[in-house]
Structures are given as structure tokens and as C-alpha cells.
Amino acid sequence: MSAGWATVGWLAGRGGTTDRVRIALTAVGAALATLALLAAATVIAIDPDDGPYRPEVLAQPGLHVGVVTALLLLCVPVLGFTGQCARVGAPARDRRLAAIRLAGATPREARTVASLESGLAAGLGSVAGAALYFLARALLADPVTGMFTRTQYVDGGAGMLTETYAGTGLLLPTDVLPPVWTLALLVLAVPVAAAVSSALALRRVAIGPLGVIRRRTRRPPRLLPAVLFIGGVAGLALFSSVVQVFGAGDRPSLLGLLFFVLLLLVLIGLLAGSATLAALVGTFIARRTGSPSLLIAARRLVADPYAASRAFGVLLVAVVFAAGAQAYRAFLLAVTSPYENPFYRQTMDLVQLVILVAIALACLGLLVAAAEGVVTRRRTLAALTAAGTPTRTLRRAVLVESLLPLFVAGPLAAVAGVLTVRGVVGTTTGDYLGGRMEPIPVPWGGTALVVVITLAVALLAVSASLAFLRASTDIVELRTG
């Protein structure tokens, strides 16, 4: 029996409690992504005659690219969070898709139901994000009094004149609205991307009337991501030598391309190599520990390292940028007085805010992943409880499984961020000040603080997921199919 689009849409909106939770969480992630994209589009639409605005990074046209880049990078942890949310209740969803097949739907229609469900959830979130955007514009539309900076082009655009004055202006660019087609495109882009990504994730899934078969083999993690990570970090740490080898010193486009490629190698190696690191850590601990909780966690890391890597991969990327920001702060402190210059102060405050939001979103994704792992393995946890394993041992095992790879990878990511920035901006101030060579101090304290804060927030997030453990260790869960 072939189902029409109306029937497929109706089926996509139906489901149990876990399906509704997945839809709600996916909508939240889509709303945040839409809000960030609309904010970036607003910054792009700012003209020199608009404003003035309180943040100096918005008053300087040359800095708008940096603001837009920060907003787009903020979408990375949002997408990671959304991806984790899409996995909530996956077994129940698979059984529901199998039931749809029993009712006469084709495998393609069953996959379309799952894809359309993600698209509808993201569409609701996208509309909510657009509503929040226009609400924020209305609430922040009133002028404020303070010090403002205005930049104007002079000599037919050949130069710029910047002046700072006391007066009235806007806190944010609420007087600027991107073109309607841009707003519509961005609002539609998020649900379309969610539906496409869901369809790609299900491309190797055969949905049969008696169950769901995932046509893939569980291959052990490879060492190639580690090679990419080490190569990218080494290239950025020795960036001046790489520039000389490629002759990119007087070619800005090639210089930017080299930096982007090396940074991409670092991030790909970090994300793809998280599974390798989790498997290695699990193997090392399992062979040497006598603690039941450590043994359970280590064996779980070895059995499914990809689950752990999905949980903390995006968080490691946030640590790289946070540590890099600390290194760049040390550079600014060495070559100027950022705390006496409002521009540098506001710039660093914006960077720190974006990074804190990114870490918080990544930790939310870790919370969702940990909770989803507890609920998915409820039959195994119930069997361990029935065999006499204390609940406190299982609690420690869940904490260790989620945090142990992060304790190892977090410092590595922080060191990578510091080496990246120091390799690009240099380690001495002589080239910038034109005087005696002075070393730029390594921000050990700030970098260590980034790692400690990240681990502490991750610990709180994973601890919150333990609320699902009591229900998942109930003996009744042994009957779960």
C-alpha cells in the first residue's frame, strides 16, 4: 500500500513520549541555529550610515567579518547538540518504523517518515527562532545613552575616519533588517538541512516489517585521525616555516588558505580521532584496573567508542577555540593595552561570551548523549543490578565512561589551541613593537582554567543524566525488547 504525502506527514507527527522529547529537543537546537544565522545576516546587512551601536566591534566595518565568523562558529556546538537530540529514543523510533512497514508502507516511505519528522521538528524550532529574533529586535529598539564610535569613509572610500563621542544610539543593530528573501532562506535552510541529514543517516538502514537492520560493520577506530591532528597542530605551530615553504608571505589569499586547511585538519582529526582515543583509553584502563565501576566503563568504551566520541567531540572543538582565545589574549596584552582600549576589551569580551555559550551548548549535548546512553542500555543495567551490582557502582561507571576520555583529550585540545595561535601570531613582540624582542608569555593559568571549567561543567551535565539511572535499573526493564 502506497502512502501519500499527507499520510506520511501525519505519521511523522505521531509517536510516544521519547519521540515527543526528541522533537522538542531538536526544535530547541534548530531555534538556536536560526537565531545565530539571522544575527549573522543582520551584521552583514549593516551599512556605514547605520547606527551608531554601543559595541565597537559593530561600529568598525572591518570587524564585521569577525563577528559573523563567531556567530557561524557558534552554530557548530548547536548542530552537535541537535545531532545528539536526534538520537534520543532511537530504538523506539526504529520499532515504530517497523510497525509502519507492517502496515504496508514501503522502505522508502518509512525512511521518509523519519526524515520528515526531523524536518518538521526543525521547522517548528526555526519558526520559534525567527520569532525570538523579531522579539529581541522589538525589546532592544529603544536608544541608549553612552559613548559611541562612528566610522565614515572619506576621499571616495580611500580612507576611513573614526570618531568617538558621547550621545545616544542603539545597543544592537535593531535598525537593520536583512532582505526578506534572505530571512526566508535562512529560516527554511535549517529544517531542510535537518531532513537531509536524517535521510543521509538512514541511507544504510533497511527497515523491514520484522525490525530494523543497519547495514554496517563496526570497524575499529583508525590512527589516521591522530595523524591528521598531529600534522595540523605541527603545521600551525610552525606556521611561519610553512609560509616560507609555500612562498605565501606576500600572497594573502594563499596565506589564508594555508591557515584554513591546517585548522581544518586539526578539527577533523580531533573529531574523528575521539573514537580512537576513547578505545585506547578504555583498553588501557580495562587491562589494569580492579575497580568494578572502572572496568564497566572501560569495557563500554572499548565496545562502542563511537558513542563516546559523539558525546564529547564538539566539546573538544570548543576547548580548542577557548584555549586559542587565551593565547590571543596574552598576545594582545603583550603588544597593547586592551584594558585601556575599549575596542580590545569589547572584542575579547565578545569572544569569551561566544566561547562560554559554545561550551555550555556542547555540555548540553553531552548531557543528552549520557541520558540517551543510560536509557538505551536499560536492559543491560537492569541485568547488572539483578546480578548484584550496587547502584552506586553503576553511577560511577556512567560518570567515568562519559568523562574519562575528556580528561585525557581536554588538555590535548587546549595545548593544540595555544600552539595554533602562538604559531600564527608569533612568540615575541619585536615584530609588532619595532623594539627589543620580548617573549609573549604562555597563558598556562588561563588555559588550565579553561580545561578545569570545561571538565566541571561536563561533570555537572553528566551528573544530571544520572536521574534516569534509577528507572533504567528497575528489574522490570529485563523484559524490554
Image: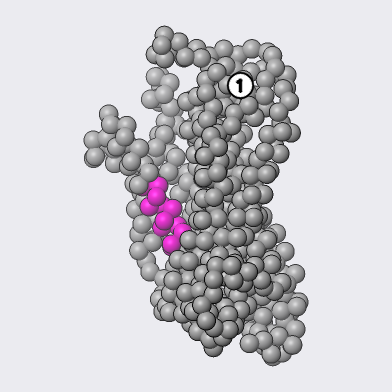
Foreground pick, 353 / 8:
8
Q: In this view, does 332 lie above or below 388?
A: above
Please provide percent x and percent y for residue 416: 45, 49
Q: Give the range drawn in magenta.
A: 262-273
Q: Name the residue under label 1.
A: 51
Direction from residue 341 to residue 245 in the image, left or right: left
Magenta region includes residue 268: yes
Quadrant (top left/top right/bottom left/bottom right) for the C terminus: bottom right
Please provide percent x and percent y for residue 38: 57, 40
Direction from residue 62 to residue 478 in the image, left or right: right
Query: Secondary structure beneath disc 1?
Result: loop
Please provide percent x and percent y for residue 421: 44, 40
**Residue 458 picture quarter:** bottom right
Which amino acid type corresponds to the residue marked 1 in the rendered image? Gly
Figure colour scheme: one colour
Report if residue 71 is visible in the image: no
Report if residue 247 is visible in the image: yes
**Residue 135 picture quarter:** top right
**Residue 224 picture quarter:** bottom left
